Structure formats: structure tokens, C-alpha cells
Amino acid sequence: LRIIRELLYHQPRGRGTDIAEALNFLNRITIRKAVCFLVSDFLATGYEPALRIARRRHDLIPIVISDPREWRLPDVGFIELEDPETGELTLVDTSSKSVRQRFAMQTTTQAAAREDMFRKMDTETIEIRTDRSYVEPLVRFFRKRERRL
């Protein structure tokens, strides 16, 4: 109950996401091996070492949340984008085909790198998309786990 209370009443110190900080917190407060679900879009960087440690100590299941609208830029001309982590604003010309292609390439590369990292760690993930029901991926995961036992 203490952990749940701390999570519910936690006041973030900044705007950015720090997955490493969350994993380090997990490793500090849990003495015994635990089943842990880490829910994120995993777009942040610098968390891999902490993830490796948490993965060795716990049964860590990353739940990767993705929004297909974030994979491609629409062709709507100039738009101002805000980085939700830093608050930085950037003006982008989405009518430029090369800009849209670079953006699509970058998101594909990020997703492939994330999948490769989890594969190298032998970490099973649950992929949940915002445009689909979350039920099927969760049921599939738990059925697969049940068969392993």
C-alpha cells in the first residue's frame, strides 16, 4: 500500500520522462523479486543500463504504448510542434515530402532500435496501440505466459 500511495501522490520535479529514475526507484524499494509492469512509449533515452539491472532483479514486463498518429506527419503545411518532454517549440513544414520522409524514417529507426534492445535483453514486451483495444495484447501475453508455466 505504501508503494501505491507513493505512486499516486508523487509530484514530478520536471517535465521530462526519466525511465532510469523510475527503474532505480523500483530497485531501491523492492527487496524481493517482483512482477513489474513498466508502461511507457519508450521514446526517452538513457534508460538501458537501469533496465538491464531491473530486468535481472525482477520479472519486468515493458508495456509499449504507441500512437500511429505519431509515426507519420500529415501534409498540412506549417505546424508548430511542442516537445512534451522539454516544452521546446519547433516550426515544421509538413508539406515538404522530404521532411515527412525523414520523420517517418526516424520513427521507424527508433522503434527498430527499441525492439532490438528488448530482444537482446530477452525481454518480452506487450505492444499496445492507441487506435486498437488493449485487451487482445494483454490476453495474448497472459495466455503465452500461462503455457510456459
Image (cartoon, rainbow, N blue to C red):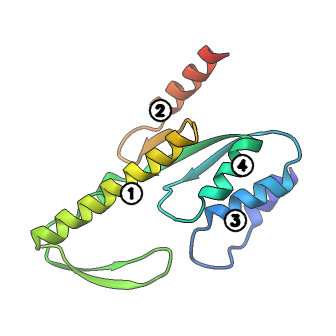
Which numbered disc, 2 or 1, marks the residue that appears first in the sequence? 1
Q: Which residue is mark 2?
A: 137
Q: Which residue is mark 4?
A: 54
Which numbered disc, 3 or 1, marks the residue that appears first in the sequence? 3
Residues marked 1 and 4 touching at CB (< 8 Å): no
The type of residue carrying mark 2 is: Pro
Q: Which residue is mark 3?
A: 21
Residue count near mark 2 (Cα–Cα under 10 Å), binned few <14, some 14–19, many ≥20: some
Which residue corresponds to the image point at 46% horizontal and 82% vertical from the top-left? 87
Q: CA separation, marks 2 and 4?
A: 23 Å
Which residue corresponds to the image point at 54% horizontal and 44% vertical from the top-left? 63
Which numbered disc, 1 or 4, marks the residue that appears first in the sequence? 4
Where's residue 9, x and y in %? 76, 66
Question: Considering the numbered disc 4 on the image, is that residue within a helix, a strand or a loop?
Answer: helix
Residue count near mark 4 (Cα–Cα under 10 Å), binned few <14, some 14–19, many ≥20: many
Residue count near mark 1 (Cα–Cα under 10 Å), binned few <14, some 14–19, many ≥20: some
Residue 40 has which mark? none
Of circles 3 and 2, the one toward us is: 3
Which numbered disc, 3 or 2, marks the residue that appears first in the sequence? 3
Q: Which residue is mark 1?
A: 110
Which residue corresponds to the image point at 24% horizontal and 59% vertical from the top-left? 104
Which numbered disc, 2 or 4, marks the residue that appears first in the sequence? 4
The type of residue carrying mark 3 is: Glu
The type of residue carrying mark 1 is: Gln
Residues marked 2 and 1 touching at CB (< 8 Å): no
Question: Considering the numbered disc 3 on the image, is that residue within a helix, a strand or a loop?
Answer: helix
Q: Nearer the viewer, residue 80 or 16?
A: 16
